[in-house]
Image (cartoon, rainbow, N blue to C red):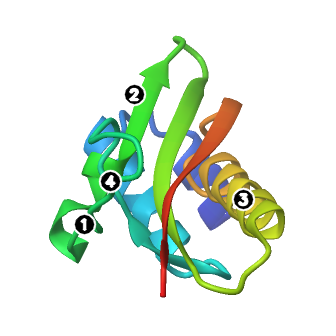
Amino acid sequence: MSAEEKFTSIPGTVEVDEGVIQDLIGYVALTSYGVAGMAMPGIGVGISKMLPLQKLRRGIVLENHGDSVSVDMYIVVQYGTNLSAVAENLADAVRYELEQYLQVPVEDISINIQGVKI
């Protein structure tokens, strides 16, 4: 019996906490091209505050649809980067990480740029 057969024959389910998903998304964001950090949603128009590493999940809103999730991300981008390229690369990276590593289907990813770090 191979290791893969042993793993797939274990009965039960694996549940992933929403906070774990938010942490993974936050760290993917910080390693993505052009992203300076995460920001809190809804502070106000033209006002943004970058979140420290310990509070990345505050810049991510997950909506659970049963078998899939929707992700809203609030980010601060680096000055001089192409905003659409940053958003597209980030959305692709988050979708890949969630679907490949956690096997969580992603319904939608919204990238909200809250500010630019100079």
Q: What mark, if any, has residue 87 been given in the picture? A: 3
Image quarter for residue 84? bottom right
Percent of width and height locating residue 21? 41, 47
Image quarter for residue 15? top left
**Residue 87 visible in the picture:** yes
**Residue 17 visible in the picture:** no
Percent of width and height locating residue 16? 36, 39
At x 68% / y 46%, what residue is drawn?
A: 99
Tally of marks: 4
Q: Nearer the viewer, mark 3 or mark 2?
A: 3
Disc 4: which residue: 47
N-term mark: 1 or 2: 2
- Mark 1, residues whose alpha carbon is within 10 Å: few (<14), some, or many (≥20)? some
Give SS at disc 3.
helix
Disc 1: which residue: 51
**Hey, what amino acid is under mark 1?**
Leu
Q: Is label 1 in contact with label 2 (beta carbons under 8 Å)? A: no
Residue 31 relative to residue 99: left or right: left
Q: Disc 4 versus disc 1: distance between alpha carbons? A: 13 Å
Q: Is label 3 in contact with label 2 (beta carbons under 8 Å)? A: no
N-term mark: 3 or 4: 4
At x 53% / y 68%, what residue is drawn?
A: 29
**Hey, what amino acid is under mark 2?**
Gly
